[in-house]
Image: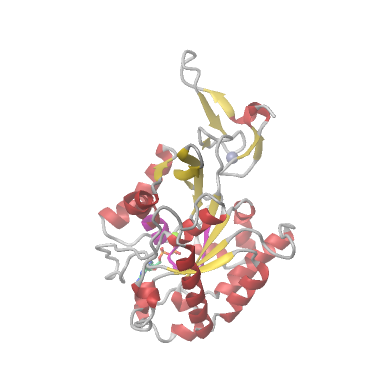
Amino acid sequence: MSFVTRRVTCCFCFENLTMSAVLHKSGTAATGNHAAVCPRCGHNLPHNIGRVAQPVVVLVGARSSGKSQFLAVLINHLREQVCRRLNAAIRQQSDDTEQRYQQLYHRPLYENHTLLAATPRSELPLPLIYRLQLPRWHWGRGWLTRSLNLVLFDTAGDDWRHENEIARYQRCLLHASGIIFLLDPSEFPGLRGRLPDAAKGEWENPDHILARIINLFECQCSVKNGQIQVPVAFVLSKLDTLHSLLQHSPLLSTENHHAGGVDCAGIERLSAEVKSYLQLWKGGNLINLAEHMLAQHAFFAVSSLGHPPQGQQVTNITPLRVEDPLLWLLYQWKYLRRI
Ligand SMILES: Nc1nc2c(ncn2[C@@H]2O[C@H](COP(=O)(O)OP(=O)(O)O)[C@@H](O)[C@H]2O)c(=O)[nH]1
Ligand SMILES: [Mg+2]
Ligand SMILES: [Zn+2]
């Protein structure tokens, strides 16, 4: 197949297009540069579209489950620390992504030291797109680099409360290569009464959200062998609020070390431990649904901020294990090796 007839998917509206439909001449005739623009939604597409993979990750979770602070801290942590340890590199795909990241995430949290505002609902949520360059070992040629465009969608928590609202993410979910599902500890009935007031978010049963997502995949005939094939990382957020309850747990004190690859054994141990806690806190139905309906899933526990905020103020952000869910997804997609 020639390059111009190759089919690509717009990472904003998910229209399936040919390369010839998205390529527009730009720049001077002398340079002959091409820009890629979606004819359906008008967004500028990554200049390397059609040449590298573009896995889509959707952040799911009830209102206030910690999705936006998680995304803000994840990008910063990948840039500051994680990529170096992995011998990888990350950069924004365009100025547009960087401006939105700075304005909506980095500036409020890291420069003004305030919590992020609730994510507004939007008809067409806009993704942040990052170019990741990951190491790949080749026998005979040594270390090579593999690139991908990582497309990250933050979503508004209110939208996960009703099946009609979830429909707005239908295209995004059905094209997802991975889902990161945030779980606020206070969503679990067995834990809710034991947390300080400050730690209580707005209550929404996570297994109801998962059930709505499963129904959506089933309605669109996107299940195989009775299961959803998209890997789902369940992430227990705000781990710092559970300090007094989990004093003797390795969950709180240890960090996985993903040097040059993914510490899968550490992730598996952590997943088993989180599952057993969720079972204890009356989250058994979520685990059941995950085990029956999801072909690949794992449970994680993170603290994005590292400690509870003081009112609206956040200082000295010290994240705990925020990179684990994404690295696990990269391993599932075979972009990182296990160590
Ligand atoms: N203690 C603690 N609280 C957090 C953390 N992350 C988020 N929160 C709290 O949860 C609230 C909702 O977070 P946010 O990321 O906006 O949730 P979203 O609605 O899912 O995007 C924040 O305003 C914080 O009060 C964390 O790592 N630790
Ligand atoms: Mg949000
Ligand atoms: Zn489009």
Residue for point 62% across, 58% down: 230
> How far across and down, in percent of the image, does residue 21 sit?
64, 29
Query: Which stretch appears magenta?
Result: 58-73
Nearest the eye: 297 or 60:
297
Judging depth in this view, the residue of 247 and 188 nearest the camera is: 247
> Residue 296 magenta-drawn?
no
**Residue 100 point in image, percent of width and height:** 40, 46
Q: Quadrant of residue 119?
A: bottom left
Quadrant position of residue 223: bottom right
Q: Is residue 131 visible?
A: no
Tally of numbered discs: 0
What residue sits 56% from the left and 56% below the top?
332
Quadrant in the picture for the N terminus: top right
Q: Is residue 66 above or below residue 110?
A: below
Q: Give the camera-side residue of 77 and 182.
A: 77
* 68 shown above or below 27: below
5 vs 148, left or right, is: right
**Magenta region includes residue 67:** yes
Q: Position of residue 6 (x, y in %)?
A: 66, 32
Q: Is residue 128 visible from the viewing direction of this image?
A: yes
In the displayed structure, 201 sits above or below 47; it is: below
Identify which residue is drawn at 40% across, 51% down. 86
Above-or-below relation of 16 to 189: above
Q: Quadrant of ligand 3?
A: top right
